[in-house]
Image (cartoon, grey):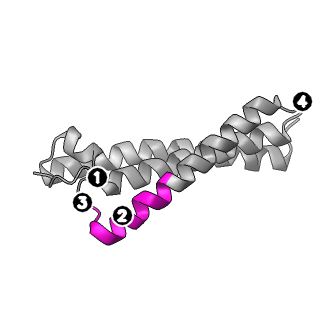
Amino acid sequence: MFTLQDVLIDAIWLFGLAGLLATGSYFDWYRRVKGWTWGCTLRTRRFLFSLSLSLTVFCIGMTLNGVVSIPRSPMWEILAWGLLSLLLMVQTVIYGVAGDNYGWDTSMEGMDNQ
């Protein structure tokens, strides 16, 4: 039987997956409007921030799912998802700060998108 807690926890990681799909779809449209290649698009701070944020939400959902599931997931699995969540949170903050400081459509590699 599903409980409200199970549904809410599953909604978190599903929301992260939906964010990944939305990121891919949006940036497919965005690169066509700008006339960029996928290589240029994948290096922009705008894309990397959205991707990292979606992956962070997904990993947080997987961590919480492992903690509250019955039977509980193995501790190594919970720690792995938790560590990945923390690393992606740091990466998301780095991309967000870089986007604010240097512009969202500039490349992380220092080259301008053409």
Disc 4 versus disc 1: nearer the observer: 1
Residue 41 % position (x, y): 24, 46
Residue type highlighted by circle 2: Ala
Query: Which residue is located at x 29 percent, y 43 percent?
Result: 42
Disc 3 versus disc 1: nearer the observer: 1
Frontmost residue, 69 versus 96: 96
Q: Main secondary structure of the magenta part?
A: helix
- Left or right: residue 75 compared with residue 47: right
Give the residue at mark 3: 105
Callout 4: helix, strand or loop?
A: loop
Residue type highlighted by circle 3: Asp
| Picture quadrant where residue 49 is located | bottom left
Residue 15 in view of the camera: no
Residue 46 in view of the camera: yes
Graded by Cα atoms within 10 Å as few (under 14), some (14 to 19) or many (20 or more), the crowding at tag 3 reads some
Q: Mark 2 and mark 1 in contact (Cβ < 8 Å)?
A: yes
Q: Which mark is residue 108?
A: 1
Graded by Cα atoms within 10 Å as few (under 14), some (14 to 19) or many (20 or more), the crowding at tag 1 reads some
Give the residue at mark 4: 71
Graded by Cα atoms within 10 Å as few (under 14), some (14 to 19) or many (20 or more), the crowding at tag 4 reads few
Residue 55 % position (x, y): 53, 44
What is the magenta range? 91-104
Q: Which is nearer the N-term, disc 4 or disc 1? A: 4
Residue 7 % position (x, y): 76, 45
Callout 1: helix, strand or loop?
A: loop
Query: Which residue is located at x 38 percent, y 50 percent?
Result: 48
Residue type highlighted by circle 4: Pro
- Inter-mark Cα distance, 2 to 4: 42 Å
- Left or right: residue 92 compared with residue 34: right
